[in-house]
Image: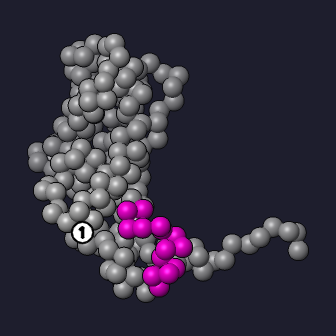
Amino acid sequence: MTGVERRDPRLDRSRAAILTAAVELLSDGGINRVTIEAVTARSGVARSTLYRHFANSTELLAAAFQELLPPLEAPDPGGSPRERLLRLVRDQAGQIAQAPTMAAVIWMTASGLSGERPADAGERTRLDALRRHIVDRYREPFHPVLADCLAGRPRQADIDLAAAQLIGPLLFNALITRRPNDTAFCTRLVDDFLTTHG
């Protein structure tokens, strides 16, 4: 024995089964379908095992979102603000092309536009926690780049609005007009944005 502990492969299998079930439920019926009961029933994994991997349903939902549409990586800080912003917008366009509906759900949730707030206080708390997870993961790469692009010291609300102005047209193309979010479109979007805000 080398003293290195080996990971139990059953843990990897159970986590994969849980995530597969959560992703299927999320894809089929949206956020409200991803409950602990539904995931354990679909995956065949015991509730106690699920809680070994995910502390609560919010963490499970966040992991399912991430599985469907991984968050963007922050661009290398060495480039110009325009180059960094263009890279982020092009990367986001690529992800939206792979899963346009899921991308819309993620960005709407992050923006607080995911529909009426449920009356149940527990459900509101759960969705607020999920929104915080999504905000942290999906909007974070845009913040430093947009802060560099916007004049002065922008407020958080200014950065959020700027992200919406850039991502909104990508989602609109993917879901409504079906025009491609190609390099030319992304470049024009970024250059128009910088001309307006520069």
Q: Is residue 57 visible?
A: yes
Q: Position of residue 3 (x, y in %)?
A: 85, 68
Type of secondary structure dominating the magenta stretch: helix
- Is 36 on the left or on the right of 193, as rendered? right
- Is 117 on the left or on the right of 139, as rendered? left
Name the foreground residue: 66 vs 128.
128
User: Number of callouts in the render?
Assistant: 1
The three-letter amino acid code for the residue at tag 1 is Asn
Is residue 137 on the magenta stretch?
Answer: no
Q: What is the magenta range?
A: 46-59
Q: Residue at x 47, y 32 (%)?
A: 75
- For the N terminus, the image quarter is bottom right
- Is 31 on the left or on the right of 177, as rendered? right
Q: Classify mark 1: helix, strand or loop.
A: helix
Residue linked to disc 1: 32
Q: Is residue 68 visible?
A: no
Residue 140's image quarter? Answer: top left
Q: Position of residue 41 (x, y in %)?
A: 36, 85
Residue 165's image quarter? Answer: top left
Q: Residue at x 81, y 67 (%)?
A: 4
Q: Position of residue 94 (x, y in %)?
A: 33, 45
Name of the residue lying farthest toward the right: 1
Name of the residue lying farthest toward the front: 121
Q: Residue at x 38, y 51 (%)?
A: 133
Name the foreground residue: 32 vs 118.
118
